[in-house]
Amino acid sequence: MSAHPRMVEVRQQILKKNDMIARALRERFHEAGVYVVSLVSSPGSGKTAFLEKTLGMLRERCRVAALVGDLATDNDARRLARSGAPVKQIITGTVCHLEAEMVRAALDGWRRPEELDFLFIENVGNLVCPSSYDLGEDLRLVLFSVTEGEDKPLKYPSIFHTADVAVITKTDLSAAAEFDAAAAHRSVQAVRPGMAIFEASAKTGDGMGRWLDFLQSRRTTSRTERRAAAPIAEPANE
Amino acid sequence: MHELSIALSIVDVAAEEAERQGGGRVVAVHLKLGPLSGVVKEALTSAFELAREGSPLADCELIVEEVAVAAYCPACAAERPVASVQQMTCPDCGTPMPEVVRGRELEVVALEIVS
């Protein structure tokens, strides 16, 4: 028995299993023509309200559905179902993020991608762990609310780096929270230069139109690999 | 914290790879870790100690090489180091650098195996 270890070079992605499932999902979604959007944010930043509003407005003209991840309850699924869109809960138990396999399993026997124009995946409220897991989505949104502070992107740079666009939520509370929109935009741009930013209030509907127009245009433009090196730039027509 | 599930994956990947390389006892796993991988080195190192218990890698060491973040500067037309992930601008000319070239790594790059 040799006492000296031999050094073997390998190159293995730790998350290759997840990445392979995500890649297969993405191919499947593309073949089916469904555009898949995931949402990440900290707990309480308004993902569910924003998604409920999005689903409600989109379902008038498109076929939409949503998967929602939560640690323990199906409260969010019930809230989202009020939009009239089909919604399915993924209860993750103690797992703090969604993985590609959970998405695959949730879709299995529930909805065929061919039946949909848009599929939304609401991740567990967490700004750290979801950043490592590709879900096969086309677009990843990172949301933060006006009550959370303008420097959220500086505190959680990794998640902003894996996201494609940012959404600032609860803008109806801007004045009360003394929210400095310009500072928030600067924080996003410092971490992820060129990233498109939407500001919206799910309560008043402010800003939702611009977001939905962007979403529709993304669906019809050519799709790129989600984990693109660069973020998605600001839409041209302001 | 998802470091434990990551650590368990490292054990799986290393055991699988060692098998493919003709077997033996893995005494060290070399890992490349980028600051934008979403994984914290200290948390991963402690999680690995738990993950290796009762596995074929029970006395295996985890050696983490931290990779610096680099991005492409469109003005310099070159890859540039990033001093802080909170300020993705070129250290030479100050141009914003949206395109990350390195810093998202989370991969096993080498194994030390005793036969």
Image (spheres, coloured by chain):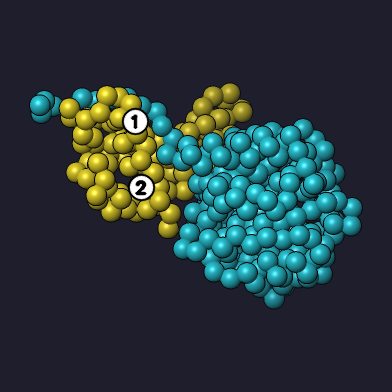
Q: Which chain is cyan?
A: A
Q: Is residue A154 above or below residue A78?
A: above
Asked whether residue A188 is in view, the answer is no
In-front residue for pair B82/B49: B49
Residue visible at 89% across and 57% down in the picture: A60
Q: Is residue B72 above or below residue A198?
A: above
In-front residue for pair B99/A21: A21
Hey, what amino acid is under mark 1?
Glu
Q: Which chain is yellow?
A: B
> How far across and how far down the image is residue B101, in percent?
52, 31
Asked whether residue A61 is in view, the answer is yes
Answer with left or right where residue A168 lies relative to residue A19.
Answer: right
Estimate the spatial distance between the alpha carbons at disc 2 and disc 1, rounded to whole Å. Answer: 15 Å
Q: Which residue is mark 2?
A: B7
Q: Which residue is mark 1?
A: B17
Quarter of the rendering containing residue A149: bottom right
Hey, what amino acid is under mark 2?
Ala
Q: Which mark is residue A91?
A: none
Residue visible at 48% across and 59% down in the picture: A95
